[in-house]
Image (cartoon, helix red, strand yellow):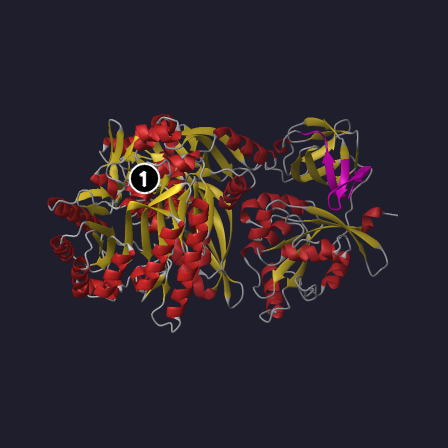
Amino acid sequence: MTTNNETDNGKKALGIYIHIPFCRSRCRYCGFYSRAAENSPDSGKAMEQYIWKLIGEIAERGAMYRRQYVADSVFIGGGTPSMMPAAGVEAVLGAVREHFVLSSDAEVTLEANPDTVDLRNLRRWRAAGVNRLSMGVQSLDDGILHTLGRIHSAGDAVEAYRLARKAGFRNINLDLMFAVPGQSMEQWMNTVNRVIGLDPEHISFYSLQIEEDTPFYEAYMTGELDFVPEETDRAMYHAAIAAMRRSGYEHYEISNMAKPGMRCRHNLKYWSFGEYLGIGDSASSFMNGVRWTEKPREEYHENDFADNTGEYVFTGLRKTEGIRKSDFARRFGREFWEVYGSRRGYLKEYFEEGLLLEEGDVIRLSERGIDISNSIMAIFV
Amino acid sequence: MDYQKYIRNFSIIAHIDHGKSTLADRIIENTGLVAHRDMKEQFLDNMDLERERGITIKLQTTRLVYKAKDGNEYVFNLIDTPGHVDFTYEVSRSLAACEGAVLVVDATQGVEAQTMGNVYLALDEDLEILPCLNKIDLASARPEEAKKEIEDMIGIDAEDAPLVSAKEGIGIDNLLEQIVQKIPAPSGDENGKLKALIFDSVYDNYKGVVIFVRIFDGVVRVGDMIRLMSTNKKYEVTEVGVMAPGHVPAKWLRAGDVGYICASIKQVKDARVGDTVTLDDDPTEEALPGYKQIQSMVYCGIYPAEGEKYEPVKDALEKLQVNDAAFLFEPETSTALGFGFRCGFLGLLHMEIIVERLEREFNLSVVTTSPSVVYKVVMTDGSVRMIQNPTNLPDPSEIDHIEEPIVKADIMIPKEYVGAIMELCQQRRGKMLGMDYITTERVDIHYELPLNEVIYDFFDALKSKTRGYGSLDYEFIRYERSQLVKLDVLLNKELVDAFSMIVHESEAYQRGRFVCEKLKEIIPMHQFEVPIQAAVGQKVIARETVKAYRKDVIAKCYGGDISRKKKLLEKQKEGKKRMRQFGKVEVPQEAFTAVLKYDDNK
């Protein structure tokens, strides 16, 4: 199973995340760490230096971990990794192969924005070992794309997808965003249906989050933008799930659906207490019970029992299959209800209302429970 | 030689913020008691809270030695007074211990309501009043006008009033000389029977209660058996001394002196302010005048907050009471809040101070319920009940009528605010008694107001409507029959007794609406709709609804940054902890005080 932490040869499985903090321009909703490089005359040079730094880090971490771990997933995320010259992708993945043991079936994902994609690049990425493409489509409505501050059009996105198929990618994710200011249910479902029509293996769909220190946050505080009411937000969410399910997608995580067998192995590590190593600026890692984040958002935390169990439960509940009490007991040496029995009082109303379900060995959120999942997860931290 | 010739006992009286404590600091500094570098700002205000709020709550007294220009050394006993209308009685007892008072008037502001209040108290005690104009270093100072106000309103000569700046240390020497020249020396009979006035008492962990006294006649020594005349209780004196500052033991205290006595007294309430101390085996015939039992004017419930235990709160209240005879408490139970205490205070400020001290000094988290005055409920059978907890109001069918306490309020304001303040007083059911022009610019309006209108937010409203220039002084005058009703609050159809309040019938609707609106702002969204209702008896008079939330989910988690997400959840959980659970509804602690706060927009 992909979520197992042990591989056949006794080494532990590892996901490697590589962060590329460059974007051509910053999207209006984005609060993530990135360097908008579009207008910088030195952007090429900065990118090159950054890639050298990544390679150095990969070598260093490889020396530390290659003996205990087999990497079965690599995820190059951003930012906009597809802005990297193809040679950069080749160099980075080359370094990973050189300094880590990469399993033969490893999932290697690259995040790409439609405006940075051409056939030549796509082919070189494939040749470098990228076997999964995650494209930031967000919407197939030009008005909505404009609101979001994206610099591609709906047509660009569809064209980029076709090229990726042409280049031979057989595992493509399309990222979508809903509850965008001004977006109607019709507009959203139009995007969903057209995306389903493209038939990608995987679809991620995120409800817009207002993050502090973003232009959207400003607009939100000043009342400049009409935000979608929560009721509509939830209706959009559930309608999208229903439509995708009818077309053969499985809802496996709060914001992710995939064709059978096409779930994202790397992202599942985050929700299944798997180990992962982050490389690059502000990348997060979780290995040997320690969570840390690289500069400039530097953090280091050694998990204790309560951290471990709390994180296991709240991340696990993001998956529609939920958590298994037997797995919990095996990992932590104590029964689930022995640890959380005292919180039954707080959980009672959620069980009673069918938002949280206990079905034999499994504890999981219902689809309605997802809507208010934070209040349930908060009980476990 | 008559030693009393070289003693001056005086207070400094002033309106809040007119610089009383700063002036006291300068006097202390200039008499050489405390070196400048050892001075904390405002030496006499030694509670953090007092320094922060710029007011004196617990009074202090200090013995100073001043070498005057005539070459003699004088002992100054400076008795500080609390600076708030809640503590009028304590002020009057402090003044009774003096022969004179330095009246500080802010030269930029002129005479204000509490200046007058304090002046009247000082005149009642036949004190020599020495006016002094402060803040003359400020460009906006208008000392001549202020002098005229003093002369016109108080009727004392302000011609020679020293012009000082306590902040800059200007004019202090002149003031000290005038204290020597103008304030009379005490003239007690050292050989008479002991007669001493208690003007303050504090609890000390090692010595028990330390009582602060002014000796009028006689002498008290260690080993004497003293008697407190209001209770007739006897105690053996274990220590006497003076505050210099800090306890400096002495052999005796004699007529004219101000100092302290320790006599193994267990509780502050056994040594009440205003009581007379005499010798048990040779008592004076007559106690000093002016003693009265302090009445609590405002009551509220204090309950341990969620997660807080009952016992630590009880212990803390006991400790506070040991030091504060005006603060009362007894256990009570609320269906909404569980076990807690009904507490009595001199006023709203006194209440706020006690609550803040619980939180700061004892690190406790408490919930306070709506403050209430004491109502006189006359039953149909003619019996009378005094009710200070709205929950205890008997069934309306058994009540003949209810009476509420009325106060006489003096409100001083610049004349341009007269309209606004009359409107405010009108809204608060005030009856205007009259208005005096203090100067051509400032007026003193007299009103009769129900106390329950004053305790909620009147002072805040006054300050807000006069841009801080208004001042208020009030005193209880009588009980008066009134159309009062109990206003209840229901959350999700369940009555929350801690929100109940007694209001005038004519205001029930407005108050009910305000409370519902406030609670709607404060109560977080739940999974279900939460109706908030205000009701009088069975009749719902106002209603709001907290909408149910539909969405509480983090859609995305960037690059495996679990810690960030976890922090969000932890924050959410912390928020939940500070909530009070009523049935299925969670109410943040601050809701209980927020419904009382003045709102400009209402």
Residue A113 placement, left or right of A12: left
Residue B80 placement, left or right of B442: right
- Nearest the viewer among A216 and B556 is B556
Residue B168 placement, left or right of A234: right
**Taking the image as drawn, is residue B72 in sight?**
yes
**A2 vs A96: above or below:** above
Residue at point 84% right, 47% down?
A: B3
> Which residues lie in the magenta part?
B240-265
Q: Three-letter amino acid code at disc 1?
A: Ser
The percent position of residue B559, horizontal first and vertical second, equals 34, 51
Residue under label 1, please give it: A272
> Quarter of the image holding residue B240?
top right
Residue B316 placement, left or right of B392: right
Magenta span: predominant SS is strand
| Residue B55 magenta-highlighted | no
The percent position of residue B98, horizontal first and vertical second, equals 70, 48
Residue at point 74% right, 63% down?
A: B174
- Nearest the viewer among B32 and B564 is B564
Look at the image and tell me in which quarter the N terminus of chain A lies: top left
The percent position of residue B323, horizontal first and vertical second, equals 61, 36
Q: Residue furthest bottom?
A: A41
Dot 1 falls on a residue whose secondary structure is loop
